[in-house]
Amino acid sequence: MNQRVWQWGRFTASILLLGPMLSVPGYALPLLAQAAPQRSPAEVQLDQGLQQIQQRNLEAAIADFRAAIALDSNLAPAHYNLGLALRQSGQLQESATAFWQAVQADPQLALAYVNLGAALLEGNNLDQATDYLQRALEINPELGIAYYNLGLVQLQQQAYATALATFEQAKRYSPTAPEPDYYQGLIYLQQDQLAAAEAAFSAAIAHYPRYAEAYYNLGVARFRQANYETALSAFQTAVDINPNYADAYYSAGLTLAQMSERDRALSAFEYARNLYIAQGQANWASTTQAQINRVKRAPGSQS
């Protein structure tokens, strides 16, 4: 089967100072049917669906993939691409079902096992996600995205040492992907291994210089080492990349308060509060207002 080369997407996750770790599964790219001099009606329908995806016509693509399956229920790429399209439209359970049908049609389709594992991970079904990701690696032991997703499962299970080793494997087989370094950095940060965390986030940024979450967490690692100037620089870069990054403004406010720059701290906190309100994060808006009040009450404050 002629499989298009997958690539890593931009996955987002962030932690506030002492905040939670989030994980985002990776999905492989669409599959093409095997090239042939004479294409079947089902393969023609599949190609039409892929063209609709390129034109961002998601509903039309779903209809085309379903039509291809109706013509040939054993056409694994049709099930596979239907799964991707359903996942993109937010239909997680239906997406997992489509990936399951893809592996029934082609039990050696490793990427379908990867995406089935990713869908189950996204649905917090960790044991089954592990089973399918390990099956993908049995078929293709050099599939970096499978190691990446398996590392995320282990991260969710708080098996940190195992996850670190699995992300290392992801880096081995996908050396330019920034996410394995990033999630290793989150684990090191969780374990208070701050120098290792800083190195991991820096490696992620080297692979993808516009990785706002990596800059943010690089700032967290530096803040915890009391390197306030360089922490502030990292938070600033994060908001330069993503002006709506409320967490980065909040953490910049904490940093500026530690540097006794009250006016700048207030400005950062106020901006963060307004973003939290706009984003519907009432609890963090309240927390930020408490920081504003604390800075205003601090000795020497002119506010």
Image (cartoon, helix red, strand yellow):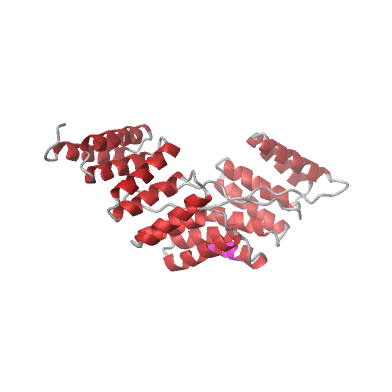
- Judge whether 94 appears above or below 131 on screen: above
Indicate the position of residue 87 as horizontal and vertical percent values. Answer: 58, 45
Q: Could you tell whether 217 is left or right of 133 in the image?
A: left
Question: Which segment is the magenta one?
Answer: 130-134
**Residue sitting at 48 percent across and 55 percent down?**
203
Vertical placement of residue 180 versus 210, above or below = below
Q: Is residue 43 visible?
A: yes
In which quadrant of the rendered view does residue 175 lie?
bottom right
> What secondary structure predominates along the stretch shown in magenta?
helix
Say which of 72 and 163 sits in front. Answer: 163
Q: Report the side of 256 relative to 40 (left or right).
A: left
Give the residue drawn at x 43%, y 52%: 22
Image coordinates of residue 242 in percent, x first then y, are 44, 38
Q: In this view, does 161 lie above or below 105?
A: below
x 44%, y 49%: residue: 214
- Residue 4: horizontal and vertical position, in percent? 70, 50
Does 62 sit left or right of 247 as displayed?
A: right
- The answer to if 49 sits in the magenta stretch is no
Toward the right, the furthest residue is 37
Q: Is residue 123 visible?
A: no
